[in-house]
Image (cartoon, coloured by chain):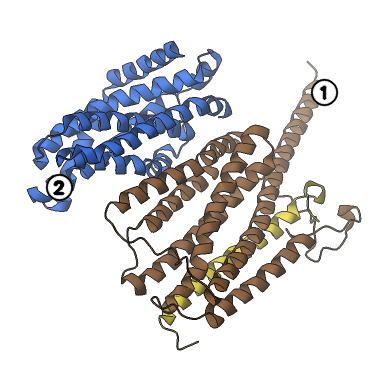
Chain colours: A yellow, B brown, C blue
Amino acid sequence: MMAMTHAGYIAAGWGGAAALVGAYAAWVLRRGRTLSRQVPPEERRWS
Amino acid sequence: MTLHPRTTPYGDADGGASAATGGRAAPGNTGSPASRVLGVLALASVALLVLYGLVWSPPDAEMADSVRLMYIHVPAASFLYAGCFITTVASAMWLRRRTPGWDALAGASAEISLLFAAITLGTGSLWGRPTWGTYWTWDARLTSTALLTALLVGYLALRRLDVDPTARSTRAAVLGLLLVPNVIIVNRSVEWWRSLHQRSTLVKLDPTIEGQMLVALMVGFLAVGLVFTWLLVHRFRVAWLEYQSERLDLDLALAERRAEAGHAGEARESTPA
Amino acid sequence: MWRDAALVAGRDLRVELRSRVTTNQVAPFSVLVLILFAFALDPDRQLLERLASGLYWTAVLFAALLAISRSAAIDETDGVRDALRLSGIDPAGVFVGKAAAVAVVLLGLEVLLGVGVVVLYGVDLAGAGLVVLAALAATVAVAATGTLYGALVSGLRVRETLLPLLLLPVLAPVLIGATRAFEAALAGVPADGWPWCGLLAGLAVLYTVAGALAYGTLLEGS
């Protein structure tokens, strides 16, 4: 796999996408936790 | 805007029951059994994509290994458009029904679309460098995507306005309703414009693609789609919670205002005229 | 509705005429933009002449942002919004009237800028029919779109910064079409330009209809 041509670009592309999605997911989940503490469970519609 | 931050713990991180919730187990997050299954599926498909995309599929005859970027780029672009579509439909539904869920969906979808727009532009540009020698070409697809990104940024900016929530939702809904029409108009115009120069546009993946490369692409669509959906579910729930939180803040503020007025009234009554 | 539109258009135009901001500030600003382009591009007459159509329409768009912002500001003063709502004036009429007023202002600016481009960039006028029709279509498109988006940001503190962000991507097709039409006209091949003129006309119709339909919701919902 390391013998791939343009390995740098592929790493940057895949890595960048993963980093963006990961960071965003972490932010959403954390915000979800914070808000969940402030809102009573009746107001939610899941679980 | 919160007068007294409501710090009552309604949900423990471990989802345990507490007296405050009347003994019912409350999730301390935006998860649910369904979304957890979705998350696991998404992770599994991403792992599969890594295998197919980076290991099992062969390099392209012309593009060599940079084709592997397409396995993310093409699905990301597709779901970017799907997200815009969801925003427009949700905006229309909000204007029809005025229920907050639609507004929350419209906003959540737009935000995730912006994320995918960044990924689309990034992978497209990284693909372009080894292939065309340059990070950016003014070809139809990249240019339209750039404009679409601007439309999304504008929409999200409008959503952050510090105004009465109903007014904000109305304006956002009208703008959201115009999103898909704008995207279509921009795409058509830009394509027409760029076609004048007889440039070969960014290679839409060779339709005769087959074998492992086709599988990789399909897995790409699956993985990106599942990730998109999982993100949308959670972001929607966060938006829903934000709406509830704002509503509860308003209720609290009103209650306090009324309590003050009540006290003031009593004080006045007890003083001899 | 047409009577209401004429009423609103008349009011908007009268406000503009009386304040003279358009003549004293927006117009000089737009000519200034043309001059700045010359500084940026090195006044090699050949280059400027070649790029003239694009530079012209870019300057028009910048001026349009100002004109639309001012049009939106007219209704922001206390109580005007409510007065409009309660007076029973058809919101579609308000929209058409405001858009018409903006269009008139823009046409004036375009004539001025046209003179500017002929003088400063050495452009030879040709294909007058296409030029005029394309300009008309583009103007209506810009005015209609702008008035609708102006209402979206009306009354906001961030109006001045949000309007360009929202409006310019939407107007990109108008810029493309108008520039191509003008280029075709000036190059003496109007046949190439008429399809673009068609696009402009389509956009004009589309946004006029969209604005007329949406304006009521926006007036109420804010």
Q: From the viewer's perspective, is residue C8 above or below residue B32?
A: above
Could you say which is closer to the camera, residue A13 or residue A36? Answer: A13
> Which quarter of the figure has residue B62?
bottom left
Q: From the viewer's perspective, is residue A36 above or below residue B217?
A: above
Q: Residue C36: give x, y in percent of width and height.
A: 18, 46
In the image, what residue type sits under mark 1?
Ser
Residue for badge 1: B270
Q: Residue B68: give x, y in percent of width and height.
A: 48, 74
Seen at 38% across and 25% down, the residue is C99
Could you say which is closer to the camera, residue B36 or residue B267? Answer: B36
Q: From the viewer's perspective, is residue C101 above or below residue B234?
A: above
- The answer for which chain carries disc 2 is C
Seen at 9% across and 49% down, the residue is C46
Q: Residue A3: give x, y in percent of width and height.
A: 45, 89
Q: Residue furthest top?
A: C3
Q: Nearer the viewer, mark 2 or mark 1?
A: 2
B82 relative to C206 in the view: left or right: right
Spatial separation of the CA atoms under disc 2 and disc 1: 85 Å
- The answer for which chain carries disc 1 is B
Seen at 52% across and 53% down, the residue is B81
> Which quarter of the figure has residue C94?
top left
Which mark is drawn over residue A28? none
Label 2 secondary element = helix
Residues tagged 2 and 1 counted as in contact (Cβ below 8 A): no
Please identify the quadrant where the N terminus of chain B is shown.
top right
> Which quarter of the figure has residue B51?
bottom right
In the image, what residue type sits under mark 2?
Arg
Label 1 secondary element = helix
Which mark is drawn over residue C50? 2
Q: Is residue C97 visible?
A: yes
